[in-house]
Amino acid sequence: MKVLGNVLWLVLAGWWLALAYVVAGVLNCITVIGIPFGLQSFKLAGYALWPFGRVVVDRPGASAAVGCVGNILWLVLGGLGLAISHVVAGLLLCVTIVGLPLGIASMKMSILALTPFGKQVVRADAAGTSHVVSSVPGY
């Protein structure tokens, strides 16, 4: 079911959401200060392209203060626009019954698009259940 969910996701929303992350990553990497944000954007592009079967967990050893500052800067440097893209995609996907689980997944991914620092994406079978922040439903 993960493969079917990922293929549907890729066709209906994943390709253009991943493209938005790549564009944001390239724009952020233009400056030296933006490189960490660009790299984060590239990591999230992979998750936006093929999300089912992976979960978001708290990154072990992540500093809360550094993550907070990073997330605030991230909002200004593209995170807010990417989160809005996920919400719009989620609303459009929720119009149909087939797209409903994909729309819910997009809504969950919008939270990660707002605050990605201090989190990491791992395979669902490799994640311990105690630190799971978010997972894509169903599949």
Image: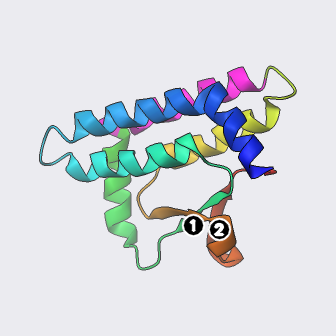
Binning the other alpha carbons within 10 Å of mark 2 as few (below 14), some (14 to 19) or many (20 upward) gives: some
Identity of the residue drawn at 54% across and 42% down: 48
Q: Is residue 85 magenta?
A: yes
Image quadrant assignment for residue 27: top left
Identify the main secondary structure in magenta: helix
Label 1 element class: strand
Residue 129 position in % (x across, y down): 71, 75
Does residue 97 appear left or right of residue 103 in this picture?
A: right
> In the rendered structure, which amino acid carries the disc numbered 2?
Val
Residue 11 position in % (x across, y down): 64, 28
User: Real-space Cα distance between discs 2 and 1?
Assistant: 5 Å
Image quadrant assignment for residue 107: top right
Residue 59 position in % (x across, y down): 47, 71
Label 2 element class: strand
Identity of the residue drawn at 68% across and 37% down: 7
**Sooner in the amino-acid sequence: mark 2 or mark 1:** 1
- Tags 2 and 1 in contact by the CB under 8 Å rule? yes
Identity of the residue drawn at 48% across and 47% down: 46
Q: Is residue 130 magenta?
A: no
Which disc is residue 4 wearing? Answer: none
Q: Range of the magenta residues?
A: 76-94
> Does 25 sit above or below residue 39?
above
Does residue 135 appear left or right of residue 75 in this picture?
A: right
Residue denoted by label 2: 132
> In the rendered structure, which amino acid carries the disc numbered 1?
Val
Q: Nearer the viewer, residue 9 or 110?
A: 9
Q: Nearer the viewer, residue 23 or 70?
A: 23
* Residue 18 seen in this snapshot: yes
> Does 60 sit above or below residue 35?
below
Residue denoted by label 1: 57
